[in-house]
Every structure is written in structure tokens, then in C-alpha cells.
Image (spheres, grey):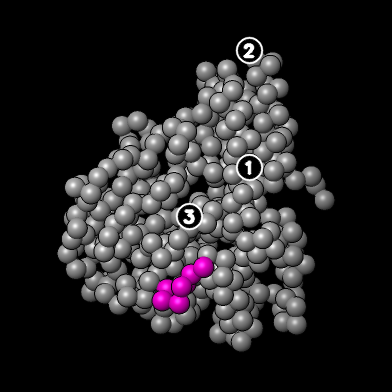
């Protein structure tokens, strides 16, 4: 087999090798299935078992209470930008948003098509390098929900403390942080995550929704965008992304084998520490995020010149450290260290950065 690189892509991103190998073994013939999961009817008993197993394992890993429903949907995280307001912005027709990056900004713009959006706080004026602070006077007590992006993939920030929204349901986009650290699901009315960062191949979106928030969708909501329809039909209203659901189920099993989310979080904190400690001591490389808000998953950093940035990215790739180019709005580099990125990958990156610094002082 050709040597695998350390893939620091923000998504689609690195997946656990043993999960890829299991999927490879089972690709042509699923155990006692006589066919590939890709060929299986989504109405079959066998696929139903795959679906139920994925749901029950996620429920166990995230300690999801019985009054929440787990849905496997399509359309990526971006479709949730519309689904959330269409389904939830239906009583006062108002919602609160904190804009901490481009995905939160896009979500707020989309929601504004369906009701009144109150931007409680934004860190756009400092290129989203921190999570902005605010007090309860900026929050609308009549809002139908309060929306945050828990981890900001592009800018490398995360919420380390959740806002207290009282009776207003908290909605969280956790596409780039699901299963990376412990989170109290009961603090949220709704959580969602696109799969292609920490869970599996692109194509599945996981939604965790409290049951009392089902059933109030706007009349104009397309049937396919209604949470209650998806819940009533156990995510099988139409053909779901069957292979993607099977694959995220394998990843859930893998997380369980690592010792669960708490164990994974410790590893993620250790990995992030390796990189951030190097950045804090470096005289050449510089992190772009206020330290207290640094993400465990995505670490942007820059060199003093564009020439050096380009040189670093090129030489890193030659050393098997790929997809380190930063998002165009931040520039420089970004290392995404999702659950599947082994400690050795981050150690190899830090060692290469040290070598690069010595050679380019």
C-alpha cells in the first residue's frame, strides 16, 4: 500500500485507519449480508440494524437523554442554516445569533430570510480571532432560539463556556467538534454536525433535537426540510445516505474503543498542546487566535511573509504533511487535528516547524 500522509485538511478530513480498513474489508460483502451496504435497501431489516446501531452508539457516547431524537439527514451543515429557522423561528419570529466566523455569519444571513435576526455579538472586526463577550441585556428574552457555532473551523476559535440562554433554546453547530470533547447535550435544544470532519465521509448530517421542538415548522417549509417528518420516519422518509450512515456508525464504534469522548478529549488536548506550546515559544511562527479561545481541532498560524508561508506549505507537503494551507480570509497555515489525527502526526508537524524555523531565521 502506498504510504499514507498526515492529512491536516479542514474537511473532508483524515479518518481513522482501522475504520477505513474495516470498511474496505466489508465493501463488497457486508458480513452475512451477501451484498455491499451501498446495494442494500434502506427499508431492509439489515440496514435498519445498521441505522439503529449508529443511533444507539452515538446516544451512549454523547449521553443523549431519551427526550431527544437523533436524525441522519442530507444537505450538509449548510442546509441547517435554513432548516433551523424554518422549524424553530415560528413563535416570535425572532432569533439571536453570535457571529464568530464565516459559518455563523452565513447562518445568520440565511435566517434573516425567514424572520428577525438579532446579532448579539460579533468578532468580525478582529478577523474572528476570539469569542466575543456580551451580557444578558444584548439577548432577546423573546427569541425563538439562540444560535452559536461551537467550533470555528476557519478561524480556529471555540466556545469554552456556553452562554446561559435561560428558557430560550440554544442551537449549536458542532460540525468541526462533535465527539472531540465532552458536551452537555441538555444545555441545547438542537445540535447538528456535518459528518466530513470528525465522523465520516461527506454526505450525512447528524441532528440531535429535543422532542418539544418538533412539529412547529412554518407552513412554507418543504417536507424534506421538516425535522418532525424526519423524526416520524426515523430518518427514512426518503433514501438516506445509507453508506455514510454505516460509516459514521463504524467511527462511533472506534470512538468507543478509544475509551469514549472523555478519553478522546484528553488526547485532543495533548495534541493541541504540542502545537500551541511550539507556537508560543517560536520567534518565527505566530498563532492568530487569542489563547483562551483556541480550538482543539483547528489551529491557524502564520509566518512573517507570504513567500515563507508558500515555502513552508510546499516543503511540509514534501515531508508528508499535507493540506496545511490556511483559509484565504486568514492566510498562512491551518492545521486541523481532528480525532483521527494521531499524536505522531502533530509531533511530526511540530518537529518540521522547528527545523523550518532553524533554516529560515
Q: Mark 2 or mark 3, which has the lower sequence index?
A: 3
Snapshot quadrant of residue 78: bottom left
Q: Is residue 300 left or right of residue 21?
A: left
**Rendered residue at 61%/81% (across/down):** 49
Q: Which residue is mark 1?
A: 270
Up/down of 76 relative to 277, above or below = below
Q: Could you say where residue 99 lies in the image, as x and y percent from the top left?
A: 32, 44
Mark earlier in primary sequence (1, 2)? 1
**Secondary structure, magenta segment, majority class:** loop
- Measure the alpha-carbon separation of dots 2 and 3: 38 Å
**Which residue corresponds to mark 3?**
175
* Quarter holding residue 207: bottom left
Judged from the image, the secondary structure of the residue bearing numbered disc 1 is helix
Q: Given this view, does label 1 or label 2 mark the residue nearer the observer?
A: 1
CA–CA distance in space, label 1 to label 2: 28 Å
* Residue 361 numbered tag: 2
| Magenta highlight range | 63-70
Asked if residue 183 lies in the magenta stretch, the reply is no
Location of residue 142 in the rendering, given as x and y in whole percent from the top left corner: 18, 61
- Residue drawn at x 46%, y 73% as measured from the top left: 65
Determine the secondary structure under disc 2.
loop
Q: Give the class, few, some or many, for how many residues have Cα within 10 Å of label 3's Cα (few <14, many ≥20).
A: many
| Vertical relation: 349 (above or below) 198 | above
Say which element carries label 3: loop
Amino acid at each position: 500500500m502506498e504510504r499514507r500522509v498526515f492529512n491536516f485538511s479542514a474537511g473532508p478530513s483524515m479518518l481513522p485507519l482501522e475504520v477505513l480498513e474495516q470498511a474496505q474489508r466489508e465493501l463488497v460483502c457486508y458480513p452475512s449480508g451477501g451484498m455491499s451496504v451501498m446495494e442494500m435497501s434502506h427499508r431492509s431489516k439489515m440496514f435498519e440494524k445498521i441505522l439503529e446501531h449508529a443511533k444507539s452508539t452515538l446516544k451512549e457516547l454523547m449521553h443523549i437523554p431519551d427526550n431527544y431524537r437523533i436524525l441522519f439527514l442530507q444537505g450538509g451543515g449548510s442546509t441547517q442554516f435554513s432548516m433551523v429557522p424554518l422549524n424553530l423561528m415560528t413563535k416570535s419570529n425572532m432569533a439571536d445569533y453570535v457571529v464568530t466566523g464565516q459559518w455563523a455569519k452565513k447562518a445568520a444571513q440565511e435566517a434573516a430570510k425567514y424572520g428577525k435576526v438579532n446579532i448579539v455579538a460579533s468578532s468580525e472586526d478582529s478577523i474572528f480571532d476570539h469569542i466575543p463577550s456580551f451580557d444578558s441585556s444584548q439577548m432577546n428574552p423573546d427569541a425563538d432560539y439562540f444560535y452559536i457555532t461551537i467550533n470555528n473551523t476557519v478561524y480556529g476559535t471555540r466556545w469554552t463556556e456556553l452562554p446561559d440562554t435561560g428558557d430560550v433554546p440554544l442551537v449549536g453547530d458542532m460540525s468541526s467538534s462533535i465527539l472531540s470533547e465532552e458536551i452537555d447535550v441538555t444545555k441545547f435544544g438542537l445540535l447538528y454536525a456535518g459528518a466530513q470532519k470528525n465522523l465520516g465521509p461527506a454526505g450525512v448530517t447528524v441532528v440531535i433535537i429535543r422532542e418539544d421542538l418538533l412539529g412547529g415548522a412554518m407552513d412554507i417549509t418543504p417536507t424534506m426540510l421538516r425535522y418532525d417528518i424526519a423524526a416520524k420516519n426515523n430518518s427514512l422518509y426518503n433514501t438516506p445516505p445509507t453508506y455514510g450512515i454505516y460509516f459514521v456508525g463504524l467511527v462511533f464504534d472506534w470512538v468507543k474503543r478509544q475509551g469514549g469522548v472523555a478519553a478522546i478529549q484528553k488526547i485532543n488536548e495533548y495534541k493541541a498542546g504540542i502545537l500551541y506550546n511550539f507556537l508560543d515559544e517560536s520567534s518565527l511562527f505566530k498563532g492568530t487566535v487569542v489563547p483562551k479561545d483556541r480550538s482543539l481541532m483547528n489551529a491557524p498560524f502564520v509566518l512573517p511573509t507570504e513567500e515563507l508561508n508558500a515555502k513552508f506549505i510546499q516543503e511540509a507537503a514534501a515531508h508528508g504533511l499535507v493540506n496545511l494551507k490556511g483559509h484565504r480570509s486568514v492566510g498562512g497555515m491551518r492545521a486541523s487535528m481532528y480525532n483521527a489525527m494521531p499524536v505522531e502526526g502533530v509531533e511530526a508537524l511540530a518537529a518540521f516547524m522547528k527545523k523550518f524555523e532553524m533554516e529560515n531565521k
